[in-house]
Image (tube, rainbow, N blue to C red):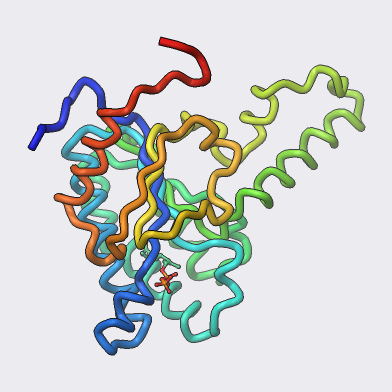
Amino acid sequence: MTSIDATRLPGHVAIIMDGNGRWAQKKGLNRILGHRQGTETVRQIVTVSRELGIRWLTLYAFSEENWKRPAHEVQGLMKLLNHFLKSELGEMQENGIRFKAIGRTWRFPVATRDILLETMEKTSANRNMTLTLALSYGGRQEILDAVAEIAGRVERGEMAANQITEQTMSDALYTSDMPDPDLLIRTSGEYRISNFLLWQISYSEIYITPTLWPDFDKKEYLKAIRDYQQRDRRFGGVD
Ligand code: FPP
């Protein structure tokens, strides 16, 4: 088994965490228990990322479309999120992890919004790694929000339409201060992007594993990173 090349780590890893429900169903458990186990995986993957020296980790925790789930499941996810943020604050501070949330988080209950803000504020000076949770996030919605903002600038005469560049767009997205993901991982075997970071993943390397998110452990994560390190990234050019 080849080991990890510390000089060729992905700077930014983004993960579509899928399969909590199926993991629970397979065991005859309530879906919420799948999400709870999924939260344990989140903890472990954050720790391993930090140990490896990954600088940016972005996790798709709740999509705009997830609001369509039954109210008790949405509430269960909010509870897990609140608990995760409160219980991990100490760990984040000790390990220099800055916390960020991206998405239409104003749709969340006020208690969750307060914890999100507090965690972002308290960890804002940390520099080792940035953990971003995509919450009430949708890639199309993000692009729409950015386009509306840029159109407003054009309307007010602050810039001309023909001055809009890729950089103008990147700067108007929720991820304006982040590099694009180098590696995008999706668990549970579905070959879909599910409205995640649509603009930002243009040149990301994609890794899909059939493993369900609650079973995605350190070994699986290292396998994904090793696979990434075998790739020849040409960004549309030639070697
Ligand atoms: C997909 O599983 C996962 C989600 C909708 C949310 C991910 C949430 C967690 C990992 C737990 C909470 C997160 C934090 C950060 C505390 P699914 O329910 O769509 O699985 P299925 O496709 O098998 O039904």
* Vertical arrangement, residue 168 with respect to residue 221, above or below: above
* Vertical arrangement, residue 15 with respect to residue 200, above or below: below
Q: In the drawing, does residue 191 fall left or right of residue 2? A: right
Residue 11 coordinates in the image, percent (x, y): 34, 29
Quadrant for the C terminus in the image: top left
User: In the depicted view, which residue is nearer to us: 114 or 92?
Assistant: 92
User: In the depicted view, which residue is nearer to us: 149 or 186?
Assistant: 186
Residue 139 coordinates in the image, percent (x, y): 61, 49
Q: Quadrant of residue 200?
A: top right
User: In the depicted view, which residue is nearer to us: 96 or 202?
Assistant: 202
Any part of residue 121 in sight: no
Residue 50 coordinates in the image, percent (x, y): 22, 40
Quadrant for the N terminus in the image: top left
Q: Residue at x 30, y 67 (%)?
A: 38
Q: In the drawing, does residue 178 fall left or right of residue 88? A: right
Q: Quadrant of ligand 1?
A: bottom left
Q: In the drawing, does residue 51 fall left or right of residue 69? A: left
Q: Residue furthest left?
A: 1
User: In the depicted view, which residue is nearer to us: 162 or 110?
Assistant: 162
Q: Residue at x 49, y 53 (%)?
A: 134
* Vertical arrangement, residue 237 with respect to residue 83, above or below: above
Q: Residue at x 18, y 36 (%)?
A: 52
Any part of residue 36 in sight: yes
Q: Quadrant of residue 81?
A: bottom left
Q: Residue at x 41, y 35 (%)?
A: 205
Residue 235 coordinates in the image, percent (x, y): 49, 21
